[in-house]
């Protein structure tokens, strides 16, 4: 059976992407992680190369070339915001900033943990249990 479960990871550096990937794999090994440093490159893959909507999109609020807020806005114009779980993270994210991202369309927002055990603890409620199937909506 072909695995169509994807998570798009957009991070500002390789260390962040590695921590996210390893943490996600330890929780949901069948979830394929596709990593990008630039949100605009991720946009092209999401729109033109994936056959199925990603189940999750993790975006660093401090990503290069396009801000996390601008990327959220793009997701809404593509009508993907209802098709997948959108997670925004940052090295520093006060509660008010996390709430602002949720108001702008993120399902979850959090401050990036420094260790894999802490990241696994943060991500486990997001990734388990799996109770939704992503669906693209018609324009």
Image (cartoon, grey):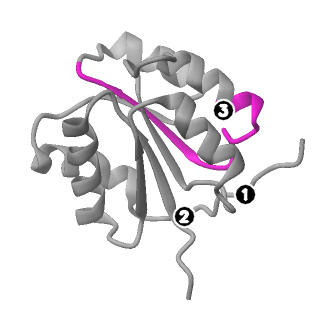
The reply to whether callout 1 and callout 3 are in contact (CB within 8 Å) is no
Asked whether 14 or 23 is in front, the reply is 14
Disc 2 marks which residue?
131
Q: What secondary structure is marked by label 2?
A: loop
What residue is at 54 percent from the left and 35 percent from the top? 41
Quarter of the picture containing the N terminus is: bottom right
Tell me if residue 87 is in the magenta stretch: yes
Quarter of the image for residue 11 reads top left
Disc 1 marks which residue?
135
Asked whether 126 or 58 is in front, the reply is 58
What residue is at 32 percent from the left and 71 percent from the top? 29
Q: In the displayed structure, would residue 11 be above or below residue 32?
A: above
Residue at the right extreme of this rendering: 139
Q: Label 3: few (<14), some or many (≥20) within 10 Å?
A: many
Disc on res. 75: 3
Quarter of the image for residue 90 reads top left
Instruction: Where is residue 87? Give x, y as percent.
Output: 45, 37
Foreground disc of the pair 1, 3: 3
The reply to whether callout 2 and callout 3 are in contact (CB within 8 Å) is no
In space, the residues marked 1 and 3 are separated at their CA atoms by: 14 Å
What residue is at 66 percent from the left and 54 percent from the top? 49
Instruction: Where is residue 34? Give x, y as percent.
Output: 43, 53
Q: Label 2: few (<14), some or many (≥20) within 10 Å?
A: few
Instruction: Where is residue 66? Give x, y as percent.
Output: 51, 17
What residue is at 9 percent from the left and 41 percent from the top? 115
Relative side of 66 to 13, left or right = right
């Amino acid at each position: 059976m072909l695995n169509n479960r994807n998570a798009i990871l957009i991070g500002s550096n390789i260390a962040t992407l590695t921590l996210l990937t390893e943490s996600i794999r330890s929780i949901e090994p069948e979830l394929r992680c596709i990593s990008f440093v630039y949100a605009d490159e991720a946009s092209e893959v999401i729109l033109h190369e994936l056959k199925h909507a990603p189940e999750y999109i993790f975006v660093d609020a401090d990503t290069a070339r396009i801000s996390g807020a601008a990327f959220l806005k793009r997701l809404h114009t593509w009508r993907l915001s209802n098709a997948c779980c959108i997670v925004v993270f940052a090295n520093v994210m006060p509660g008010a900033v996390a709430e602002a991202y949720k108001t702008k369309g993120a399902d979850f927002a959090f401050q990036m943990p420094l260790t894999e055990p802490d990241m696994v603890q943060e991500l486990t409620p997001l990734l388990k249990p799996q109770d939704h199937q992503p669906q693209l909506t018609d324009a």
